[in-house]
Amino acid sequence: MPNRLRVAMLFVLILVISGCAGGTMVVLTPNPDGKTGSITVSNQAGAVDIKTPYQAATIKSSTESPNPPTTLNRETVNTIFSDALSIEPKPPVHYILYFEKDLLLTTDSVKLLPEILTSIKERSSTDISVIGHTDTVGSREYNMALSINRANSVRDLLVTKGVDINHIKTTSHGKENPLIKTEDNVNEPRNRRVEVVVR
């Protein structure tokens, strides 16, 4: 059935309904952060917009317009889509490790390492991102090298604790993507960081 779905920042559940009623049901659900986007469900006969969490539209055939949206409760959605939801991956977990200077982690960041290792172990993660950043003090070249070294130092810490180096991807941004926007040559501790994303 030639259906066209335009999706912007949302989670959508789609169920092909068999039997004499037949068709396809599309349900808009919130993102893990609770925000909801919108979706247009369309075919050659017409289109409907879904903008509210747990609204659903059903398309019975390519020659009939999608039904107007109806609202389902969360329990109904969980029941109808239980098979799909049971294999839904967990959302990534994000950690930020801060640096006193150069490659020296803050005390609080060192204390966060066991939690990161636990997340990696519990998820059996093979997809870990380690992203280095700096504040704006110093040249672009200096900060790029420093952010690479910070990312590599955190990667090496994880590897010494048993994480497979092949499961870690390191990248760096230098001073280009500050957490806190500042002018150039500003000492901002919250920008001296490495972000660790465990998927």
Image (tube, rainbow, N blue to C red):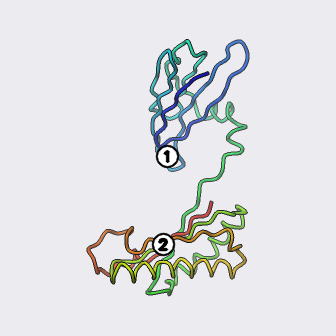
Position of residue 190 relative to residue 41, above or below, is: below
**Of the residues tagged 2 and 1, which is closer to the observer?**
2
Q: In this view, does 8 lie to the left or right of 21?
A: left
Earlier-in-chain disc, 2 versus 1: 1
Q: In this view, does 112 lie to the left or right of 7?
A: right
103 relative to 191 in the view: left or right:
right
The structure residue drawn at horizontal position 53% and vertical position 34%, both measured from the top left corner, is 28
Q: Where is residue 189 in the image (x, y as percent from the top left)?
A: 39, 79
Q: Give the residue number, with chain letter if any, for mark 1.
A: 34
Mark 1 is surrounded, within 10 Å at the Cα level, by few (under 14), some (14 to 19) or many (20 or more) other residues, namely: few
| Residue lying at 56% horizontally and 12% vertically, measured from the top left | 63
- The answer to whether 144 is drawn above or below residue 43 in the figure is below
Q: Say the numbered circle drawn on residue 172.
A: 2
Q: Residue furthest front?
A: 141
Q: In which quarter of the image is the N terminus?
A: top right
Quadrant position of residue 139: bottom left
Viewer-nearest residue: 175 or 197: 175
Kind of residue indicated by mark 2:
Ser
Instruction: Pick the quarter of the image with the C terminus.
Output: bottom right
Q: Position of residue 107 (x, y in %)?
A: 52, 84
Give how far apart the Cα atoms at labels 2 and 1 are: 29 Å
Q: Residue 101: where, in percent of width, then height?
A: 43, 87
Badge number at residue 12: none
Q: Give x and y (percent) for residue 150.
A: 51, 80
Vertical order, 76 against 164 (above or below): above
Q: Within 10 angstroms of label 2, few (less than 14), some, or many (20 or more) residues? A: many
Kind of residue indicated by mark 1: Gly
